[in-house]
Image (cartoon, rainbow, N blue to C red):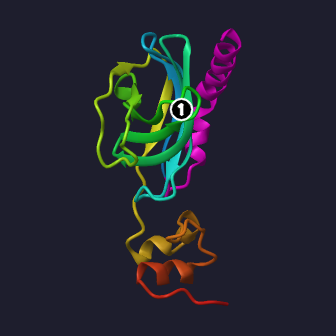
């Protein structure tokens, strides 16, 4: 158990220093919640790297944390719903066996410490509803939540903007024309 905690603390320390750099590498067209920290109470060694397109499709990433100082919980992200500075993340806990689990991240920026909460969510497999989560304030670390603007207008494709977006299958556009066609609802042209 000490080895698990040591690994978790090492990963947390690394991500605390790199969370802002990771968030800055996220594309403009990607919802994301990234960072690491500890609440000093229920949750420690928290590591979050969750991403999806603006509609929540194609979620990816991982969430891990230690609960009560001894129980390692973590697994792959299954859903992400971002609204402003708040991210609701679903993940499948493969470490302790809880299965469906939800985490909530609140990025308070410079206005105060960030907030984190997590709890098992049996039977809840998407991020359309939130289970009751114990929330605690971070005493160390930082989270960065990015709420991407969905691709809805041709103008977003111009001046290289097409490079920031993906199609319905999560594949990047190859050129500005594909992006514009996607916005206009035209079928893709096969080269």
Instruction: Choose between 30 and 45: the one closer to the eye.
Output: 45
Image side of residue 91 versus residue 81, left or right: right
Q: Residue at x 38, y 37 (%)?
A: 122
Q: Quadrant of the C terminus?
A: bottom right
- Mark 1 Cα shell of 10 Å, populated few (<14), some (14-19), many (≥20): many
Figure check: 181 above or below 105: below
Residue 159 screen position, x and y as percent = 54, 72
Q: Is residue 77 visible?
A: yes
Q: Residue at x 41, y 83 (%)?
A: 185
Q: Residue at x 71, y 13 (%)?
A: 3
Residue 121 screen position, x and y as percent = 37, 35
Does the magenta-highlighted stretch encompass residue 118? no
Instruction: Choose between 129 and 160: the one closer to the eye.
Output: 129
Q: Residue at x 40, y 63 (%)?
A: 150
Q: Is residue 46 visible?
A: no
Q: Main secondary structure of the magenta part?
A: helix
Image side of residue 37 versus residue 152, left or right: right
Figure check: 155 above or below 132: below
Instruction: Choose between 116 and 122: the one closer to the eye.
Output: 122
The stretch in magenta equals: 1-30
Report the residue marked by disc 1: 35
């Amino acid at each position: 158990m000490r080895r698990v905690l040591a690994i978790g603390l090492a990963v947390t320390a690394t991500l605390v220093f790199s969370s802002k750099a990771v968030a800055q590498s996220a594309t403009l067209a990607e919802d994301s919640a990234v960072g690491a920290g500890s609440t000093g109470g229920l949750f420690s060694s928290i590591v979050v790297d969750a991403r999806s397109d603006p509609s929540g499709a194609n979620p990816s990433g991982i969430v891990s944390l230690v609960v009560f100082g001894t129980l390692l919980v973590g697994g792959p992200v299954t859903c992400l719903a971002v609204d402003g500075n708040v991210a609701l993340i679903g993940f499948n806990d493969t470490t302790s066996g809880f299965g469906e689990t939800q985490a909530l991240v609140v990025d308070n920026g410079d206005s105060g410490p960030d907030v984190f909460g997590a709890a098992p969510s049996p039977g809840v497999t998407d991020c359309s509803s939130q289970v009751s989560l114990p929330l605690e304030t971070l005493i160390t670390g930082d989270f960065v939540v990015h709420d991407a603007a969905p691709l809805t207008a041709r103008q977003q494709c111009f001046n290289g903007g097409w490079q920031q977006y993906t199609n319905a299958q999560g594949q990047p556009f190859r050129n500005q024309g594909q992006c514009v066609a996607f916005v206009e609802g035209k079928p893709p042209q096969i080269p």
